[in-house]
Image (spheres, rainbow, N blue to C red):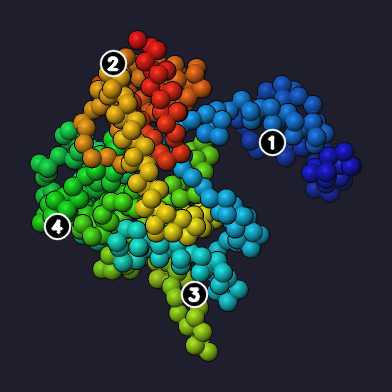
């Protein structure tokens, strides 16, 4: 056959139509109003191509993309360019892993279940929490789920979110809050940090980001005290790589810690998919959304793994479910687990330190070139710089010179149109940073 992926011949089509008693494919679409049917011709796509020619054509199209393998990137804001150990793909692409799905039959899914269990264990060690689930869709939906859990647990409808949380995360929280009728209030930002002047009266939770959207390190201990004194839960959204060097949220008073495991071996892929994590203190264990893998023993006393505490909508009555999350990101969670295992606890710490050192060098280089760093203070691998001109223009100028710049903050805050959130991970070299500074200096 000419096209081996399209096995239906014209005769097959005629036979099918004859069997069901219609004259043409168009007859099958009669119930769809004509105004809703696609009327444009597909001729612009071109004629079908043999496989070799199609691969060549698609490769040429793909080469038009700018990506972190071809251009140095200083873009972060929730999706980061980090080292991915080569062993990760070798392990991840084993067929028993990448074809596995829901391990409903534990007796034939022990490998997949153990991989999930190890992910949960490592997340708990990083975050300082007691229990973690086996992953969520991404970090932002994990955060929104956390606010829903807090409101259900405290029976309070007021969610207080730090203004220094990622703007897109705030939008998703508002979307989640709309269904059950929860109120979302955003606190002011003072010098790049969550305001200490908080009204947490009748709040179900206080939500902060660590490091926050602007790259700054929040004082979690004082914020946790303020939340707990008001009877609210303390929810922290954290970059897990930063926890290789920062004190864990659990040790500083967090009741719920969530985040995105993307820094651990998961490619940016133009924005996803990724893998969220969700960890809680023991008191909230039975309200944890998503899947939880537990360790047990079989009838012969041998170690085994099972899905446990399955309070999902697929397992119990929907009105009793703690969440409508009905899946997880097992493959990406496995990628994170392999990466964390390959790096080891000392490797994760060293990688985190390298991020801080690289970002510090870039910050000092920009300051030396005459640019103002906004709300300067302790940070991880991101900071805000004011270029004095529209940051969108700076971004385009950098692209013209083969550099992917940071995030123009005017994207979210009109008053910050001259400012850019710049990220420098461990993969950025001194030469790339020096080139960045030189290129932006050439705009003056």
Query: Secondary structure beneath disc 2?
Result: loop
Q: Which mark is residue 305?
A: 3
Position of residue 69 relative to residue 302, above or below, is above
Q: CA distance from mark 3 to mark 2?
A: 57 Å
Q: Which residue is mark 2?
A: 388
Query: Secondary structure beneath disc 1?
Result: loop
Do residues under tags 4 and 2 come within 8 Å of each other at their CB atoms? no
Q: CA distance from mark 4 to mark 1?
A: 61 Å
Look at 30% across and 63% down and name the residue there.
129
Q: CA distance from mark 1 to mark 2?
A: 59 Å
Q: CA distance from mark 4 to mark 2?
A: 41 Å
Query: Secondary structure beneath disc 3?
Result: strand
User: Nearer the viewer's eye, disc 3 or disc 2?
Assistant: 2
Look at 52% across and 54% down and name the residue there.
335
User: Nearer the viewer's eye, disc 1 or disc 2?
Assistant: 2
The one nearer the camera, 77 or 140, is 77
Do residues under tags 4 and 1 come within 8 Å of each other at their CB atoms? no
Q: CA distance from mark 1 to mark 3?
A: 52 Å
The one nearer the camera, 251 or 38, is 251
Look at 41% across and 39% down and name the residue there.
425
Residue 166 visible: no
Q: Which residue is mark 1?
A: 30
Mark closer to the chain start, 4 or 2: 4
Mark closer to the chain start, 4 or 1: 1
Please tell me in which quadrant of the rendered image residue 155 appears: bottom left
Query: Secondary structure beneath disc 4?
Result: helix
Q: Quadrant of the C terminus?
A: top left
Q: Which residue is mark 4?
A: 228
């Amino acid at each position: 056959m000419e096209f081996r992926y399209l096995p239906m011949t014209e005769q097959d089509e005629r036979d099918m139509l004859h069997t069901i008693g219609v004259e043409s494919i168009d007859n099958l679409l009669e119930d769809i109003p004509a105004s809703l049917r696609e009327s444009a011709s597909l001729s612009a796509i071109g004629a079908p191509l043999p496989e070799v020619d199609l691969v060549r054509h698609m490769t040429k199209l793909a080469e038009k993309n700018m990506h972190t393998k071809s251009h140095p990137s200083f873009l972060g804001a929730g999706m980061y360019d980090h080292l991915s150990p080569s062993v990760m793909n070798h392990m991840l692409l084993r067929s028993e892993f990448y074809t596995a799905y829901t391990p409903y039959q534990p007796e034939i899914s022990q490998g997949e279940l153990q991989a999930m269990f190890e992910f949960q264990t490592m997340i708990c060690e990083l975050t300082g929490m007691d229990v973690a689930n086996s992953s969520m869709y991404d970090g932002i939906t994990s955060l929104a789920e956390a606010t829903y859990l807090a409101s259900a647990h405290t029976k309070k409808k007021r969610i207080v979110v730090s203004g220094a949380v990622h703007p897109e995360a705030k939008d998703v929280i508002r979307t989640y809050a709309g269904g059950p009728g929860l109120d979302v209030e955003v606190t002011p930002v003072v010098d790049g940090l969550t305001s200490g002047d908080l009204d947490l009266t009748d709040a179900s939770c206080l939500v902060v980001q660590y490091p926050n959207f602007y790259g700054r390190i929040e004082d979690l201990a004082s914020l946790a005290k303020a939340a707990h004194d008001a009877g609210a839960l303390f929810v922290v959204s954290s970059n897990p790589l930063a926890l290789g060097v920062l004190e864990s949220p659990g040790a500083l008073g967090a009741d719920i810690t969530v985040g995105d495991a993307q820094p651990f071996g998961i490619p940016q892929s133009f924005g996803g998919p990724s893998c969220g994590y969700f960890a809680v203190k023991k008191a909230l264990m039975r309200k944890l959304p998503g899947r939880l893998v537990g360790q047990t023993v079989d009838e012969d006393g041998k170690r085994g793994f099972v899905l446990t505490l399955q309070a999902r909508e697929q397992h119990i009555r929907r009105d009793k479910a703690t969440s409508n999350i009905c899946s997880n990101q097992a493959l990406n969670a496995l990628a994170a687990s392999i990466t964390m295992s390959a790096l080891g606890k000392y490797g994760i710490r060293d990688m985190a330190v390298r991020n801080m050192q690289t970002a510090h060098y870039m910050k000092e280089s920009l300051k030396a070139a005459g640019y103002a760093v906004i709300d300067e203070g302790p940070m991880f691998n991101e900071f805000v710089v004011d270029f004095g001109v529209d940051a969108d223009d700076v971004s385009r100028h950098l692209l013209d010179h083969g550099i992917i710049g940071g995030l123009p903050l005017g994207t979210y805050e009109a008053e910050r149109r001259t400012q850019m959130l710049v990220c420098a991970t461990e993969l950025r070299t001194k030469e790339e940073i020096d080139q960045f500074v030189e290129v932006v200096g050439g705009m003056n």
